[in-house]
Image: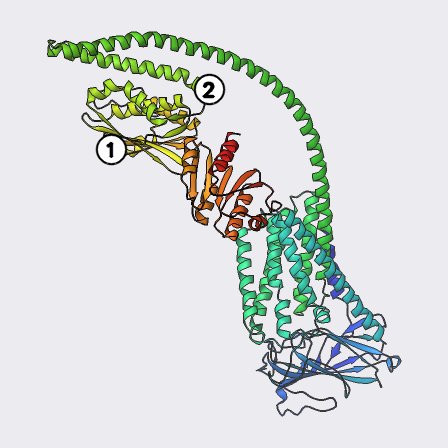
């Protein structure tokens, strides 16, 4: 805080120096000579003639003396009144100043430094001698050319009194004025001052640009670090702004830069200031309101958009509101930082202090530009202080982070060593517990299996005997038959329960011992249906099958039989008497589907969502059959282990359909373009190989992404470019595998082989066969698929 107060007092002291004053158009230096190492600001009462371009040595030709008087540089024309008559911001005028020199200064090489014209045009005279013209002077917008150049004029006073005449025209800026106070001094002193300011501007510009690129690089490596991005963009925009003010370096780089473009570049601070506010909000989110920052952003973006769109001669009305907005932004930032300064630690205070210095310097420059205070421009110094002090603080943070990272690494190594020992101990304990649990579970399963097996045989025998009695004894009364049927129902439920207990006890064993093999689906289905002959007769149900004779599945036949048993039993249970159960089969390139459909009571959507879960409710069948609610859940889990998918669709009172979707586990051969002989396909199909054909390039590409094949048969039909395109697709999508490509054609000679250079397809093996060589093609396929 003391540093900040001292900085402000230094500014006041710099602004409080009392140079010789100009009174009623006269600067009297006759009592003391010029100091060769200092410059005198020519601020004060210059002779002012409105709407006249008076040549040196001439008097005003205006009959109305109300528009002449005295006016200081920096004072807007628009705010002036002469005897009640208010001036406008657009027009032209003449400023005149008489300088009385000390006798020692007569004949010396002197200079006056004119800062940027601010968008006007100047013509400068010493006595009757024209020294320079900045822009093109004119009495209308069409006859003048504005500029923002600055300049130094050199002259030698010939006698003790010299008159400096400055003619100014402005028709492009709504707030016309002799914007900045000139500075008078010796030639060496003014050149040294200008060189010093240019050096400072150039050095600060280079430093700020380097820092901008540095923080942008940090952001690119860690894009979640928005603080670095905001600070980088802020530095970049401020660099561009600094090139357009003070010594106006941008005109040194682009001498012919149009005034309108230079003016738009100058106002890039409309982006720099909100970037700085976002930077502060990112650093201290608790001190600044995100909503307030967004509001500032909105006003700045609207302002800059207007500056870019509206012609420069019509946009000057926005400068005063912009000045208020800029001051408000920096005062808000100052207020937020001061609120948190008291409660922060030393490192954070070091981070806040340069920001406060920068804010104070920015406010100073805004007020100095508009001649509210006579202090020097110090924004560059404040910005450099901000950058270097923050770099020091951030370096300290990085060092602390590295030390902390090293400490954490050491602790982590120690923890890992202890953790490895702990894991070994826990693993040994878990292994003992696992062995004990497996042994206990094995004995439990053996017990259940033994008891269930011992109960199953006598119950099945009693059930078969009762069934035989009902069929053979014709003289039994209806009441006796009814009692036997009731007993059969009870025995059937008990037998079903025993089957489920046996299934549950061997479920894990079945999963762990699953073995895939090719089997006939029709044979498996017949075995299952025979087991339900009594149940089907009891309800007078008919089974209607739509299966080809040669449907071969590749899966675990024991598991598939168990799944079919549960689903068919479920279909019988919930089917209405005298109805039918439909079993049908479909096959595509990617899957084999078996559907079992009943015409029973169906299920609501709510029941379907919980059908395979633990929440399944037990429902009675259409003839009061009871179940235990585990058959379908067991089937679902078992089928998923076989990489299959059990699906259900049902509608209440309209029956249910269970779909067993088997993956295609067979060996697959993809064929492009039809082959005239079907014998090859029949031979491969008898070997259990799935042959898939595609006649269009798009279809082949789709199949290639869906079905894995280690052999591709490509039928060459004189289109070598299409053949190469297919090989490129196969090569691109199977970089990790070695694939065999069989090229079939009536003439497969060197011409085609030149297109298929093996060096271009290192993972493809090309084999060439004539189309009629079916034996050779078949032998090759069998050999490769079996290996």
Q: Position of residue 703 (x, y in %)?
A: 45, 42
Figure coloring: rainbow
Query: Number of callouts in the render?
Result: 2
Which picture quadrant has residue 616?
Answer: top left
Compared to 496, does 361 lie above or below?
Answer: below
| Residue at the image point whose x is 56% and y is 62% from the top | 300
Secondary structure of the residue carrying numbered label 2: loop
Residue farthest toward the right in the current orientation of the protein: 104
The answer to whether one can see residue 321 in this image is yes
Q: Which mark is residue 652?
A: 1
- Look at 58% across and 73% down and name the residue there: 316
Residue 338 can be seen, yes or no = no
- Left or right: where does residue 342 sit relative to residue 479? right
Q: Around disc 2, counting alpha carbons within 10 Å, would you say few (fewer than 14), some (14 to 19), or many (20 or more)?
A: few
577, 418: nearer the viewer: 577
Residue linked to disc 2: 513
- Residue 81 image position (x, y, % from top left): 60, 80
Quadrant in which residue 480 is drawn: top left
Label 1: element kind: loop
Q: Relative to the observer, which residue lies in front, 745 or 729?
A: 745
Looking at the image, residue 770 sits to the left or right of residue 43; the answer is: left
Where in the figure is residue 337, as x and y percent of width and height? 63, 51
Q: Nearer the viewer, mark 2 or mark 1?
A: 2
Quick one: label 1, few (<14), some, or many (20+) residues within 10 Å?
A: few
- Counting from the top left corner in percent of width and height, residue 79 is at 60, 76
Instruction: Identify the image quadrant of residue 516.
Output: top left
N-terminal of the pair, mark 2 or mark 1, is 2
Label 1 near label 2: C-beta < 8 Å? no
């Amino acid at each position: 805080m003391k540093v900040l107060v001292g900085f402000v007092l230094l500014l006041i002291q710099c602004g409080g120096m009392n140079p010789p004053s100009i009174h009623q158009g006269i600067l009297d230096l006759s009592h003391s000579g010029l100091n060769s190492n200092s410059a005198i600001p020519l601020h004060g009462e210059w002779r002012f003639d409105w709407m006249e371009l008076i040549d040196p040595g001439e008097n005003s030709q205006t009959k109305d003396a109300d528009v002449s008087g005295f006016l200081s540089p920096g004072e807007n024309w628009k705010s002036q009144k002469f005897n009640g008559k208010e001036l406008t911001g657009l027009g032209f005028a003449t400023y005149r100043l008489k300088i009385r020199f000390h006798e020692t200064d007569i004949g010396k090489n002197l200079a006056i430094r004119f800062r940027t014209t601010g968008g006007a045009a100047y013509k400068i005279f010493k006595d009757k001698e024209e020294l320079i013209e900045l822009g093109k002077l004119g009495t209308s917008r069409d006859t003048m050319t504005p500029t923002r150049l600055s300049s130094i004029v050199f002259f030698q006073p010939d006698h003790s009194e010299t008159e400096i005449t400055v003619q100014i025209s402005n028709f492009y800026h709504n707030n016309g004025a002799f914007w900045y106070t000139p500075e008078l001094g010796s030639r060496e002193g003014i050149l040294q001052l200008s060189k010093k300011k240019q050096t400072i501007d150039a050095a600060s510009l280079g430093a700020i640009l380097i820092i901008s690129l540095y923080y942008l690089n940090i952001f690119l490596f860690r894009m979640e670090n928005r603080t670095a991005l905001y600070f980088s963009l802020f530095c970049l925009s401020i660099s561009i702004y600094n090139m357009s003010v003070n010594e106006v370096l941008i005109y040194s780089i682009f001498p012919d830069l149009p005034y309108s473009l230079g003016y738009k570049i100058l106002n890039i601070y409309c982006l720099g200031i909100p970037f700085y506010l976002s930077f502060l909000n990112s650093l201290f989110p608790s001190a600044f309101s995100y909503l307030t920052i967004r509001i500032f952003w909105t006003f700045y973006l609207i302002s800059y958009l207007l500056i870019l769109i509206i012609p420069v001669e019509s946009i000057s009305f926005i400068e005063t509101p912009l000045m208020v907005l800029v001051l408000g932004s920096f005062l808000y930032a100052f207020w937020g930082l001061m609120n948190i300064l008291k409660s922060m630690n030393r490192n954070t205070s070091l981070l806040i202090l340069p920001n406060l210095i920068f804010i104070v310097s920015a406010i100073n420059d805004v007020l100095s530009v508009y001649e509210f205070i006579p202090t020097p421009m110090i924004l560059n110094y404040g910005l450099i202080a901000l950058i270097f002090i923050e770099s020091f603080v951030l370096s300290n943070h990085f060092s602390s982070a590295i030390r902390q990272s090293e400490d954490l690494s050491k602790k982590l190594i120690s923890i890992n060593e202890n953790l490895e020992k702990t894991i070994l101990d826990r693993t040994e304990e878990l292994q003992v517990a696992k062995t004990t649990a497996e042994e206990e579970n094995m004995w439990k399963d053996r017990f259940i299996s033994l008891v269930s097996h011992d109960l199953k045989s006598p119950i099945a025998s009693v059930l078969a005997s009762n069934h035989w009695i009902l069929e053979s004894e014709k003289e039994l009364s209806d009441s006796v038959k009814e009692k036997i049927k009731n007993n059969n129902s009870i025995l059937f439920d008990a037998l079903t329960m025993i089957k489920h207990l046996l299934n549950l006890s061997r479920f894990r064993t079945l999963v762990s011992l699953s073995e895939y093999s090719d089997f006939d689906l029709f044979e498996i289905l017949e075995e299952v249906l025979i087991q339900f002959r009594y149940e089907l007769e009891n309800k007078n149900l008919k089974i209607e099958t739509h299966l080809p004779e040669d449907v071969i599945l590749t899966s675990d036949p024991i598991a598939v039989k168990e799944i079919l048993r549960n689903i068919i039993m479920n279909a019988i249970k919930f089917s209405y008497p005298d109805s039918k159960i439909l079993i049908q089969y479909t096959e595509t390139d990617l899957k084999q589907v078996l559907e079992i459909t009943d015409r029973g009571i169906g299920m609501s959507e709510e029941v379907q969502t919980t059908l395979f879960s633990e929440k399944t409710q037990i429902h009675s069948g259409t003839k009061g059959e009871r179940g235990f609610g585990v058959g379908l859940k067991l089937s679902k889990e078992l089928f998923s282990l076989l990489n299959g998918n059990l699906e259900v669709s049902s509608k209440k009172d309209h029956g249910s359909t269970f779909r067993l979707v088997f993956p295609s586990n067979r060996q697959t051969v993809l064929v492009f373009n039809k082959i005239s002989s079907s014998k090859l396909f029949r031979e491969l199909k008898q070997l259990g190989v799935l042959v898939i054909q595609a006649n269009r390039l798009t279809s082949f590409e789709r199949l290639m992404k869906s079905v894995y094949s280690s052999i591709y048969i490509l039928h060459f039909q004189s289109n070598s470019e299409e053949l190469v395109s297919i090989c490129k697709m196969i090569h691109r999508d199977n970089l990790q595998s070695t694939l065999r490509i069989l090229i079939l054609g009536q003439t497969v000679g060197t011409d085609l082989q030149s297109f298929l250079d093996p060096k271009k397809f290192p993972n493809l093996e090309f084999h060439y066969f004539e189309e009629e060589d079916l034996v050779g093609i078949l032998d090759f396929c069998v050999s490769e698929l079996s290996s």
